[in-house]
Image (cartoon, rainbow, N blue to C red):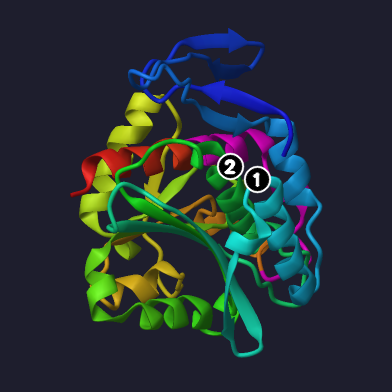
Amino acid sequence: MKRLLLFSFTTILLILNGSCQKRIAVSQFDSTKVITSVKLVTQEELQTELCNVPTKNSEREEAMINLLVQAGADKTDIKFQVVDGARNIYVVKEGRTDKFIVVGGHIDKVNPGKGVIDDWSGASAVSNIYQAIKDLPTEHTIVFIGFAKEESGLLGSRAYVQSLGEEARARCKAMVNLECLGPAEAHIWVNGSDESLIDILRTTATKSQLPLKEHRLYGVSADSNSFRAKKIPAITIDGLPEEKFGLIHSENDSCGNVNPTFYYDSYRLAVDYLLELDKTLK
């Protein structure tokens, strides 16, 4: 994660560059005149990190650690929670308050395929979203987490929520789950997400001029369920409409079935959405 695109979160210019739109701006945040910008990685780098995923779950955990370090985290700031022999891996960006937002994807995969779509696309995006906003002042503290054991029954996310305790859960204002991004445009899992968060995402997509679709899915689960079960508002953003379900849990789960433009747009949307949540949620 070395090449960065600098984006202001207050003033945005849209400039066409070939088939891609780059937003370029700089804003002076306060009287100290420190330049504060969103730092997006390039589409090429995002895709490279997505495709270079190990296939063993233990190695994927190490890859998640490396991505967070490359994103700017100090190794001593990376936290671990052991879950049934695996690990939740996360970093915490401190905000002005102790109210917090969680953004996550899951690290583990099932045996068939490379697990690129399900869900390295989400876990890798989490590290890049951290890099994009880690130096920005935020109202909320933000937890960037790769969950363990999602495929075994949401064990990692359940363990994390359980570890919070009642008082901390009351301070958790939202959870954003990134799941199976890239085969198609970003979608809201409508019947698996809270309406208050859905409304903010719709607004964000319109403001950012990024594609967003909606669908209802049945007979599926995601780490957002663990948070909703404890009355924490949560949303899942995915890129897997039902007609593409055959891509996951099979040999088709590979980098070749991820559309780079859809994946990059989903990443950009997630960055903008997290900043919008920080401004909107009380």
For the point 46% across and 42% down, the residue is: 270
Residue 40 in the image: state x and y as whole percent.
58, 32
Q: Residue furthest front?
A: 32
Q: CA distance from mark 1 to mark 2?
A: 5 Å
Q: Nearer the viewer, residue 49 or 248?
A: 49
Q: Quadrant of the N terminus?
A: top right
- Magenta part of the protein: which range? 249-268
Which residue is farthest bottom? 84
Compare marks 1 and 2 and give the one earlier in the sequence. 1
Q: Residue 254 colored magenta?
A: yes
Looking at the rendered structure, the secondary structure element under dot 1 is loop
Q: Amino acid at mark 1?
A: Ala
Is 121 or 212 nearer to us in this picture?
121
Q: Callout 2: 10 Å neighbours few (<14), some, many (20+)?
A: many
Q: Is residue 121 left or right of residue 27?
A: right
* Residue position marked by numbered label 1 in the rendering: 71
User: SS for tag 2?
Assistant: helix
User: Relative to 122, does residue 11 appear above or below in the rendering?
Assistant: above
Where's residue 216, x and y in %? 36, 59
Magenta stretch secondary structure, dominant:
helix
Per the image, the residue denoted by label 2 is 131
Is residue 176 visible in the rendered image? The answer is no
